Amino acid sequence: MSETTMGKGRCLCGEVKVTASKMSHNVGSCHCGMCRRWTGGPLLAVSCGNGVSFEGKENIGVYDSSDWAERGFCKNCGTHLFYRLKESGEYIMMVGIFDDDDNFVFDHQIFIDEKPAYYSFSNETQNMTGAEVFAKYAP
């Protein structure tokens, strides 16, 4: 189990502020086609469990992206905020919205089989294919 800490962050315009009471230090990347289309590249995020609170909730838009998850964004500036698993309520938060990034460690990648050839991270990470992700986490 990864070490956790309290994390505070905000969207680009500051209209949405987030506090995550149990933010992981472990950064992961998702290379699935949906995440790449949503972010314009690989998604970089941290798990925050369901201990997440927001100021400015009225500025959060939510897109129901699949049967198992939804994606949240600031309706004012467009900042991508989270990927939330519907069944567990777990928030996977965009790592770039958090203020203090000195303690993050990039250590895992998922949907590695969908990663396009035009980029590659140099970090040594744990890698999982889409099939492995669904086998491990699908409800």
Image (cartoon, rainbow, N blue to C red):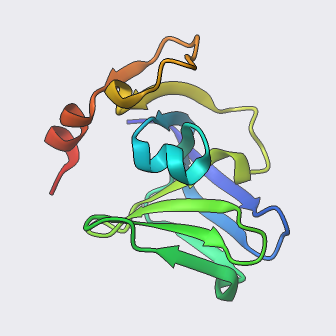
Q: Is residue 116 positioned above or below 77 on the image?
A: above
Q: Residue placed at 44% from the left, 58% from the top?
A: 49
Q: Position of residue 31 (x, y in %)?
A: 44, 35
Between residues 61 and 115, which one lies in front from this camera angle?
Answer: 115
Question: How many discs mark residues in the rendered view?
Answer: 0
Side of 6 relative to 91 (left or right): right
In the image shown, does 2 or 9 lie closer to the viewer? 9
Q: Residue at x 43, y 27 (%)?
A: 115
Q: In the picture provided, is 82 more to the left or to the right than 58?
A: left
Going 55% across and 35% down the picture, which residue do you hit? 27
Above/below status of 135 relative to 93: above
Residue at the extreme bottom of the image, as rendered: 58
How far across and how far down the image is residue 43, in percent? 54, 42
Residue sitting at x 59%, y 49%:
39
> Residue 120 at what x, y percent from top left?
55, 16
Q: Position of residue 73 (x, y in %)?
A: 62, 68
Seen in the picture, residue 95 relative to 54 is either above or below; the reply is above
Quadrant in the picture for residue 95:
top right
Residue farthest to the right? 13
- Looking at the rendering, in which quadrant would you find the N terminus? top left
Quadrant where the C terminus is found in the figure: bottom left
Closer-to-camera residue (123/30) = 30
